[in-house]
Image (cartoon, rainbow, N blue to C red):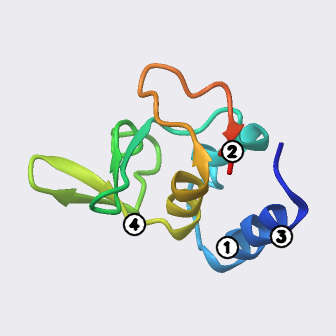
Amino acid sequence: MIQPEEKLTLEELKSQVKCPRDFMCVGAALEDLCRAEFDAQSGILECLGCHDPGPIPCPFAKPFAAAFACTCPLRIYIAQHFDQWSAESTSVLKARSG
């Protein structure tokens, strides 16, 4: 469950980010996140889907080596504060315990 202070932080970050895709990657109450994989050691969030061509490309997916790194502060916050790292399924959000 998302804590009230986390919800406030998410809303604050959302208000600061200009997203031409209308936050599609974090829609549905964070239950349908874009596919991404977070490397806690390097602090890099690798995009696994947001850089795909579509009607509006994600401006936060930046080429990084042979992949794409996510530079969106909202999606990075979610990556750092919630366990959601399965590239196959992004349908369940679990708050990190402890």
Residue bearing the label numbered 1: 13
Q: Nearer the viewer, residue 76 or 53?
A: 76
Q: Residue 60 location, x and y as percent?
A: 40, 63
Q: Quadrant of residue 75?
A: bottom right
Q: Earlier in the sequence, mark 1 or mark 3?
A: 3
Residue bearing the label numbered 3: 8
Q: Residue 10 location, x and y as percent?
A: 73, 65
User: Circle 3: is it few (<14), some (14-19), or many (20+) Cα within 10 Å?
Assistant: few
Residue bearing the label numbered 4: 71
**In this image, 60 relative to 96: left or right?**
left
Q: CA distance from mark 1 to mark 4?
A: 13 Å
Residue bearing the label numbered 2: 97
Q: Residue furthest left?
A: 65
Q: Which label lies toward us, 1 or 2?
A: 2
Q: Which label lies toward us, 1 or 3?
A: 3
Q: Earlier in the sequence, mark 3 or mark 4?
A: 3
Q: CA distance from mark 1 to mark 3?
A: 9 Å
Q: Secondary structure at mark 2?
A: loop
Q: Residue 92 location, x and y as percent?
A: 67, 27
Q: Earlier in the sequence, mark 1 or mark 4?
A: 1
